[in-house]
Structure formats: structure tokens, C-alpha cells
Amino acid sequence: MELAPGTQALFVPSDPPRDGVLALWGHGGGDTPIDLVLPREQAYRRTQVAASVLPVAEAVRVLLAAGEHASATISAWAEVVAAGLSLVARGRIEPDGASWRAGPLEVDDALRLTELAGALPPEALALPLSGLKRVRLHSPESLVRAVWDAIADLLAENESVRLVLRVDLGDECFAGVLAVRSASDPGLVLDVADLADAPEVVRAQFGEHVQVRLALALRRGAVVWPPLARAVGGVVELADHEVAELLRGGGSRLSAAGIEVLWPKDLFDGLPRVRASVRVPSDSPPQLTLSRMLAFRWQVSIGNEELTDDEVAALAEAKRPLVRLRGQWVRADSLLLARLRAARSPMSEAEAVAAALAGSVEVDGEECEFVPPSVLTGLLTRLREAPEAEVGPPPGLHGKLRPYQLRGLAWLARMTELGVGGCLADDMGLGKTIQLIALHLHRRGDGPTLVLCPASLLGNWEREFARFAPSVPVRRFHGGRRSLGGLAEDEVVLATYGVLLRDRQALATVDWGLIAADEAQQVKNALSKTARELRRLPSSARVALTGTPMENRLADLWSILDWTTPGLLGNAEQFRQRYARPIERHADQSRTDQLAALVRPFLLRRRKTDPDIAPELPAKTESDLFVPLTREQVTLYEAVVRENLAAIQQSTGITRRAQVLKLLTELKQICNHPAQYLKEPGALDGRSGKLAAFDELLTVMLEAGEQVLVFSQYVAMCRLLEGWLRERGLPVQLLSGSVPVGERDRMVRRFQAGEVPVFLLSLKAGGVGLNLTRATQVIHYDRWWNPAVEDQATDRAHRIGQDRPVQVHRLITEGTVEERVATLLARKRALTDSILGTGEDWLTSLTDAELAALVHLP
């Protein structure tokens, strides 16, 4: 660019300094308006002029090329630029945050700055400070300094050459050789020692002022890695500890400072791979022994070759950061050496299995890769993969297992054969009970089986064994006369969690072949007395049955699996630190994946909606849940039976029929809840076995996000349930015969929209004419004597338009008129669905003896 006569110049500083510009004005050109303070009419006034602005690099070129006829401002700024270039050439440049500045200034430099500032003409100082109400100008010294900083920042930022530190490894000593890499031709690298003698055409590839730039780079590098300050003739001799520090962190710091570090290629090809492992005795059994302790060992390999114990020992005793092994250099940093030299505690087999499944183990607070020994690998393969041959239905099983249930049996059989436990966590209604019964038959002769369950399920287990495995001796260890005497090898003992607490010593004297914990979520609190006593029971295998292995927290899952497979997930604190806290607080995906890989072999979870299960299931699955009476219910029940049977025996005709219906109605109300029969307000909890079972059932359903229809033939019972649910803050609505048609339709729409998860319906009002396909669960709180009426109510959900399986649950109070009528209904249903006619009329025709047998408690 040629400067026109009369062109004036001033410098406009910026941050960072390299973004400053030189403004040229007074030459009759330019398209950038700029405010200046110039003399006008015997005073200085703010005046706007048109200017041309030049970036620093172009400004330096233009100013240095200006001739002797240039204006005073151009000549003054040319002197300032020349002095700034001299400063940088002498290495007077230092970092200033994210940019660079000229300095530190020697005494002569400071004097030169004062001299140049004093020589700046007024037009070079016409730039006012911005952001002030009153006019203030930049000081001459600050403007000179701004130009120098801009040159320093520009040269430091726009390097045409890059410094390289190449590490040479000799047998006796190590050295760092300095080289330069061309920015225009990155493939061109030249040792600094050879730069002076290189042909001009080669040196030109590294740009102007290459020595200045190298000096700047060395200064930067020495700040982050001091050994560079000792470089002589392009070489710096390195001590062992300096090489070690360069390997650990010095190299990355130099890279951040713009200095490339080159290592011999085979050094990193030979980087040792250190993995944790254990030693398993060669005579180990074919099963896992989770409590057995195994010696810890480090497995060290280079490439695909594992080092011998002698080579590992030599590596551990290394005195230098690099060791020559198998013809190549191997890194032996202090962390590796400390790891190899430290004594290690043994690991339990459960910890080794967990480490193998997760792929890593924590050692000294750091994550370390884990490789299982070959003996353990075979067992882990069996854990991960499906059994090679499907297990067939065991002898003695009366009933057909569906394909997914056969797979469940095969999984349970494999886990128990390997000596580990498992959690069968299938959805409610997929047949966990029959799979456990089949497992007992499969293991028959391996020792007695103990089934622990809530009291409300004792009768159900007893009936299911009688139904599906009638040849299996079953003992109910419950009540005042319970005993474990004369226990057979293939016997099944049914006990409640309450009995476990009260009679733990008796249960602990038996070497159980299998212990199954039904509704295992009830022992999710590992600190509870029940959970602690459960852990003390001896057994060859443990199986947890639950549809909700994790209700609220990951600790629930830990508690269950720590019983089935002790040690797998570590202790509670280890599990909390390693998995629960990172996953629950920080949604750590890596820990989530790791935990899933660890848990997956020990937990079998199938959902009703799984593609390989849904086609195998009937569209409607029905189940009877038998529940016990509470003490209050027993007292009321026996009193009503006594009072009414005597009167019935003295009656005939229509009077007798009315009295029979009254008896049956009162007994059914007592079975539902004493409050319904007594018609007295008050607390409901703890007084009805059926309500307790309903509570458990509904909790599981709602936690699974399901919508539920609840039928009762009594509006009064529906109202009691409605109040009870509302007290718990659950959205609920009740449909009875008194609800107007319009409100009835609105209720249906709300339920179908998912706004209300629980829909209470009286059997007569809600049993016909409604389409409630949003429901996937149906509960019959009490029984109607005609199965066809129940079926009609169930069909509100199980009908055209329903695209999901429907689970139907009938609550039946065991040992009462409800259970005996349910048995009669089941037999009659097998012949014809409607053979009983309608209502309770057929029951009124029973003889006195038949009626007494029907209603008496056992």
C-alpha cells in the first residue's frame, strides 16, 4: 500500500493486543468513521474523520516501507515498530493470560520507550479514551507500549515454525533433541543443530525470524518443564527422573504450550498392560464357592505376550523409568512400580466373579481392568449364556410349563447347579410359583426346600404344590404345633417371615437344599431383623421371587442379591459408593452399564409385554389369591355361624331360604372387612386379611404403572375402599348404580385417558355395558356366586380393543365359605360356565349338613 502525501496515523489499542489496528486519515480516503480530538478554531474539539484501518501485520509492513517524505506521525510510528521488533528478536516477550506482551523491559528498553513517547506528534495522540464523559486522551507511553505488545502477541500467535522435542533413548543415557517443524510443510522436520547449515530453500520453509521464534518457544517450554532451559546446541541431557516426569505430565504440559514431544514408536507399542486377576487352584470344584478366598495377582503383558513372573519381578524392581524387556523399551513409571510392589489382600470368589462381569475392579481407589483366570472363565460363560440343552419338565409335575417358564426353570437349575443364587423377577402373573415348584422337582433329593412368604400366601403355596406336584410332601411350619421333626429329603416346608423371627433357631438347624424367599421385596431392608435372620439360614442354594426387585432405591436390589449371591455387589457401603450414588445422583451411564452387566446373570426379569412371551400367554390370565382371616374376623365369623345355623335348622320354606341368604351375606361381609359387617366407622388397617392382601397387590400394580378395575358386589365395601385409598392420596373413582349416566360416561373417559389409575365398581353397576380397555389388571374383591357374572365384569377390560394381556385376581378368604364356594365354582366351570344358574339361589337349596360343611371354619 502506497501512502498518499499528508497521510496521518494513530494506533488504536485492543484486547488481545494483536487485534489492535493502525488508523490512517487525512489522505482523502477511507470508509471507517473514527472520533478524534483535533485543534479546531483555537481549541481542541471532538471531530469525526474517515479513516482506513490496517491490522498489525500489514501496519508493520507499511510503516517500515514508508519513505523519507512521510508525515511526522508515520515516521514516529515507524520508529516505534522498529523498536518493538528489536525487543521480540531479543526474546523480550512474556505470557500475559491468554495473550503475549513485550517484556520484561531492561533499563535501556524503558529509556527508549520514554524517548519514543516524547517524540509522538499531537496528531498521533488524537485518540480519546472511550467510556468517559469528559474528554481524556491516551498517554504517549501507553500507546507505544500497546504497539510493542501487539507485535509480540502477533509473532507469538502466528508461528510459521513449531518446536519439537525428540526423546532419544540410549542404553546408558537419555537425551532430548530439539528440532523444528515447518508450518507450511508439516512433513519437514529439521534438527535445530542442522538449521544454520541447511540450504536457503530449506530454511525458507521455516519462515522469517526462525531463531526468534525458537527462543520464544524455549522460553514458553521452560516455564512448564524447566529442563528445557538447559538446552545447549539443540540438545538437553535428561536424568531418569526427568524422563519419568516427562512421561507422566510434562509431555502434556509441553503440548499445551505448543511444543511437540516425540517418543520412540516401540516405547508405546511396548506399553505394559497391567490387569488384576486371581489365582484359582487347579483342583477347584466345578461350582462357584462364593466365600472362598483367592490370591490376588497382577497380570502384566506387552502386546499379546504375557510377562513371566520373573519378568514382572524385574519390572517391579526397576530403578529407571524405562526398562529393556524382550528387545524393546518398557515404561516403568512410579505408579506401576508401586502397584506391582504393594502387597494385596486376597479376593473372595464372589468379588472375583463381580470383577469379571463388570470388567474392572477397584484397587487403591482406582479403577483397574480385571481378567479372570481360565478356570473361572468357563463358569462365567455358563452364567452369561443360555443353557446348552433345555431342561425338560421334571418328573412329578402335573401341569404344562409354557416355553418361557421352561426357560426360567433352566435358568434356575443352572444357577443352583453352579452354586450361586438368583432372583426370579418376572412380572406378576407369569408363573413364578410353578417355576419354583418345577425347580424343587428338578432338584428332588438334594435336600428339603424352605419357602418363606407372607402369611397371606401360605395357603396359596400349599394349594399350588397340591395342584402341580401332588407327590411332594408339604409341611406348613406355622401355628402353635409346628415341628420340623422327621423332615424328608424332598420335603417342602412353608413358613412365614414372622415364624422365621420367632423360631429362627429351629429353622437354622436344617441344612436346606434350597431356600426360596417369596415376595422378597419384604426383606429389602438389609438392616431389618427379618433380613438378618434370613441370611443366617444355611442352604445350598437361594432363590428370591419378586415382581419388584427394586421398589424405590438401588439399595433394594442390593439387599435381595446380597442374600441370593453374597458378596457379589460388595458390602452396602461399597455398593453405595461404587454404584448407587453415581447412578442415583449423577445418572452415571458408565456405572449403570457396569451394574447391569454385573446383575444380569443373577436376575431373570420377564415382562408381560416381552415379544417372546406375549404370544405364549392367554389374553386373560386368572388367579385366585387366598388370604387368612384376622383374629377379629374369626371371632365375628364363628359367632354369626353359631347364631344363624340354629335358626336355619328350625326354619322351612321361604323363611329358611331368607335366613340362608342372610347368613351367607353376613359371612361374606365379615370376610371383606369387619367394618362392613358392623357398619361402624373407624380405622380399617390391621383388621382384614383381604384388605392387607389388596394393599400389597395394588401397590405392585400401581408401581408398575398399571391401571386397575376393582369389583365388589357391595356398594358399602366400595365406599370403604374409596375412603381408604383417598387417605393414602391415591386418585380413585367409584361407580355405583346411583351415578347418573352423564357422570358415568365422564368417569369412563377419565379412566381411559389415564387420569385415574384405580376404578372401583359395584358388580351390578359396572359389570355390563362399559368399555374399559385401559385396564390391564382386574381385582374381584369378593366373589359372586355365578361365574358368568364375574366374567361379564372382567370383560369390561378383556374385550375387543384391548391390546395388552389382562390379569384377573380373585381375593378369597381361606377356610371360609368363600374358599369352599370357589372350589365348587371351579368344578362347575369345567363342565359349563353357567350351570349354576344365577345368584345365590342354588345355595339356599343345600341341606343343613351341606350348609354347615360349607360355612364352618376348619
Image: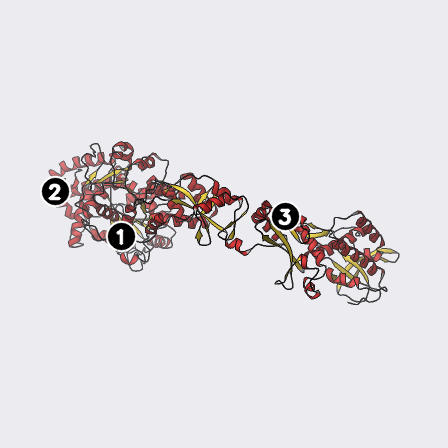
| Residues packed near mark 3 inside 10 Å, few (<14), some (14 to 19) or many (20 plus) | many
Say what secondary structure mark 1 lies in.
helix
Circles 2 and 3: CB atoms closer than 8 Å: no
Q: Residue furthest right?
A: 42
Identify the residue at horizontal 53%, vertical 46% (top origin).
333
Amino acid type, callout 2: Glu
Q: Secondary structure at mark 3?
A: loop
Q: Residues within 10 Å of mark 2 (few under 14, many from 20)?
A: few
Q: Residue at x 65, y 61 (%)?
A: 183
Determine which quarter of the picture holds residue 349. Answer: top left
Reply above or below: 3 against 177: below
Colouring chosen for the image of the structure? secondary structure
**Circle 1 residue:** 405
State the mark number for residue 850: 2
- CA distance separating discs 1 and 3: 66 Å
| Three-letter code for the amino acid on which mark 1 is drawn | Gln
Q: Is residue 217 left or right of residue 540?
A: right
Q: Earlier in the sequence, mark 2 or mark 3?
A: 3
The CA distance from mark 2 to mark 3 is 100 Å
Q: Specify the amino acid type for callout 3.
A: Trp
At x 53%, y 53%, the residue is 267
Q: Dividing the image into 4 quarters, which one contains the C terminus? A: top left
User: Which image quadrant: the N terminus?
Assistant: bottom right
Q: Can residue 682 be seen by looking at this rendering? A: no
How crowded pointer 1 is (Cα within 10 Å; few <14, some 14-19, many 20+) is rated as many
Whether residue 850 is visible, yes or no, is yes
572, 242: nearer the viewer = 242
Residue labelled with disc 3 = 225
Q: Is residue 60 above or below residue 634?
A: below
Q: Position of residue 612 (x, y in %)?
A: 31, 57
- Nearer the viewer's eye, disc 2 or disc 3? 3
Say which quarter of the image contains residue 196: bottom right
